[in-house]
Image: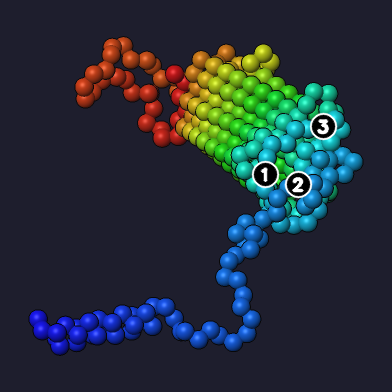
Amino acid sequence: MNTSNRTRIITAIALTLVAAGLLFAGPLTPPAGPVTSTYKTLTEVEPRIAINATNTPGDADSLFKITQRGSYYLTGNITGVVDRHGIEIAASGVTIDLMGFDLSGIPAMGAFDGVSATVFNRTNITIRNGSVRGWGGEGVDLGSVGASISAVIDVRASNNTGNGILTGSFSMITGCTAYDNTGDGIVAGGGSTITGCTASFNNGNGIWALEGCTISNCTPQVNTLDGIRVTSGCVVLANTCSFNGNGGDGAGIHATGSDNRIEGNNCTRSDRGIDVDVAGNIIIKNTCSGNTSNWEVAIGNVCLVILAPPTVAPISGDSGGLSPGSTNPNANFTY
């Protein structure tokens, strides 16, 4: 290649690079006005409020107090002190992310809660993702003053002197664990939904729900009283209840009122499997076994119970065994 051709090629490459630079680097002349930062502020990066002595100072009965609506989060563990709630909520529209941290009470601290709504009729409160244990009152209390439309999600409440989790009406309790509380494990006001929760070794009921609630896919075990107790108008669906009435007197599922639908649950090794006190309920597709009394159902309810015979030989391959004893798809079975 002669010198002339090489020069032309180099010139063409240089012009191409310049053009590319103009295309991708943007205009060389800056816009009019002062130069401003392109970085996001801390508030923009984390648009929530940290719970601390500056942002949420406590008062005479709380370590931290939330008085304005907004989204809040913990930055570390909280250890209780005598005569104070851990986090007090005095506003509606509050979400608290515990960020996986632990709120731990201390001995002889008095009847104070880990998280507590203290102003009447607050609404739209959410508590999520953390542990609340060892408080002199409730672990999480969103119900004592009538707070409603609340949610408790992925919270572990244990070893509290009161109830583990207490909510008001129209609430949602999801994915929570209530363990070894002196009161009930989980208590929900009317119209609430409790799903995917575990309630074990509580000195009261595992789960106690008032009128018009739905309780599904929960596991209440080894509670002193009932595994699940409902009043009226509830749906109790696909729960696994065992060893309830442990050291006390209790049923796997206990309905004290009417208009409940109790369906598809398995209740074993309790004082009573399914206990229904009054007429006007429907009990279908449940199974009970190994309870002192598998069924205690008052007259006037829709309920068919079949004693399913056990197999008389092992089953291997493609066939064998005995029919449960009924073609009714809504039958309940004792096994």
Q: Please, what secondary structure does the residue beneath circle 3 have?
A: loop
Image quarter (top left, top right, bottom left or bottom right) of the N terminus: bottom left
Residue 71 place in picture, x, y as percent: 68, 54
Residue 18 place in picture, x, y as percent: 34, 82
Decide which of tag 3 and tag 1 comes sooner along the chain: 1
Amino acid type indicated by mark 1: Thr
Nearest to the eye among marks 3 and 1: give it: 1
Instruction: Return the residue nearer the eye: 255 or 267.
Output: 267
Decide which of tag 1 and tag 2 comes sooner along the chain: 2
Give the colouring mode of the picture: rainbow
- Residue 292 in sight from this viewpoint: yes
Amino acid type indicated by mark 3: Val
Mark number for residue 81?
Answer: 3
CA distance separating discs 1 and 2: 8 Å
Image quarter (top left, top right, bottom left or bottom right) of the C terminus: top left
Q: Which residue is located at x 37 percent, y 15 percent? A: 310
Mark number for residue 120?
Answer: none
Q: Please, what secondary structure does the residue beneath circle 1 have?
A: loop
Q: Please, what secondary structure does the residue beneath circle 2 have?
A: loop
Mark number for residue 52?
Answer: 2
Instruction: Return the residue nearer the eye: 193 or 69.
Output: 69
Amino acid type indicated by mark 2: Asn
Instruction: Return the residue nearer the eye: 85 or 45.
Output: 45
Residue 106 place in picture, x, y as percent: 78, 26
How many circles with numbers are drawn on the protein?
Answer: 3
Q: Which residue is located at x 73 percent, y 23 percent? A: 182
Residue 115 place in picture, x, y as percent: 74, 40
Residue assigned mark 1: 75
Decide which of tag 3 and tag 2 comes sooner along the chain: 2
Question: Mark 1 packing: few (<14 Cα in 10 Å), some, or many (20+)?
Answer: some
Q: Are the two marked residues, 1 and 2, in contact with CB atoms closer than 8 angstroms?
A: yes
Instruction: Return the residue nearer the eye: 23 or 221.
Output: 23
